[in-house]
Image (tube, helix red, strand yellow):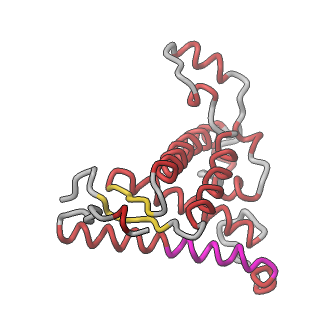
Amino acid sequence: MLLPTDVIWIFDGRDGVGEMLAELVAAHLRAVELLVPPSALREVDDPLEAWAVDEGFRALERLDSTRLERLFPPAVDEALDPDHIAREAMVRSRATTMHAHAREVLAGLERHGAFVPVTEEESSAWLQTFGALRVALHADLAGSPSRLAEPTRERIDEHPALAAVLDWLAYNIEDLLETRSACLSVGAGLDISEIEEWE
């Protein structure tokens, strides 16, 4: 069994890769933050005050891009949620969680050098953030927020860098999962005692 503080993966941010990821995550955080209710972005102790600061806030009105529409699709048929109350609540909740995950990843990138050790308790935030970035950028490449949309050969040829980033994100997700699985199988985290000497 792994401890929350056990390192289960190391992100390799050498050669500007860390800066690239930080830029991607920061842009994702800014976009998602527009959907987070104001009370979730600052301390509001009084429930009535929290309600007051959120009054008039409509997350659904801010789903104004292909990326965001893909990240927050309707959870139920519109006929079952005619006033969009359930979808509004879902978007607010998911956006708040995505925002917290992105902040955690950014903090890790800022705290460490080229090699970023990711602990068991941090792994979910990294996986979810990688996944969210991949979903959003895939929608960009496909040119559609539809879950089933796939990019055409023409769009891939027109946007080779974007396609490469999507492959890179998929690689990191797979590598993180495989390394975590290996750590779970031996019941111990990675030895990073010499991490400062790796650069």
Q: Tell me where residue 54 appears, x and y as whole percent.
A: 65, 24
Left or right placement of residue 126 versus residue 96 in this view: left
Left or right placement of residue 60 versus residue 197 in this view: right
Picture quadrant of residue 96: top right
Q: As drawn, which residue projects farthest toward the front?
A: 197
Q: Tell me where residue 26 appears, x and y as whole percent.
A: 64, 50
Reply above or below: 154 against 67. below
Reply above or below: 138 against 67. below
Q: Identify the residue shown where x is 38% and y is 59%.
A: 117
Picture quadrant of residue 137: bottom right
Figure quadrant of the N terminus = bottom left
Dominant secondary structure of the magenta stretch? helix
Q: What are the residue bounds of the magenta stretch?
A: 158-171
**Residue 67 or residue 173, whichever sits in front:** 173
Q: Tell me where residue 57 appears, x and y as whole percent.
A: 71, 29
Q: Tell me where residue 141 appears, x and y as whole percent.
A: 74, 72
Q: Identify the residue shown where x is 44% and y is 74%.
A: 174
**Residue 81 or residue 157, whichever sits in front:** 157
Reply above or below: 49 against 92. above
Figure quadrant of the C terminus = bottom left
Is 37 colored magenta in this rendering?
Answer: no
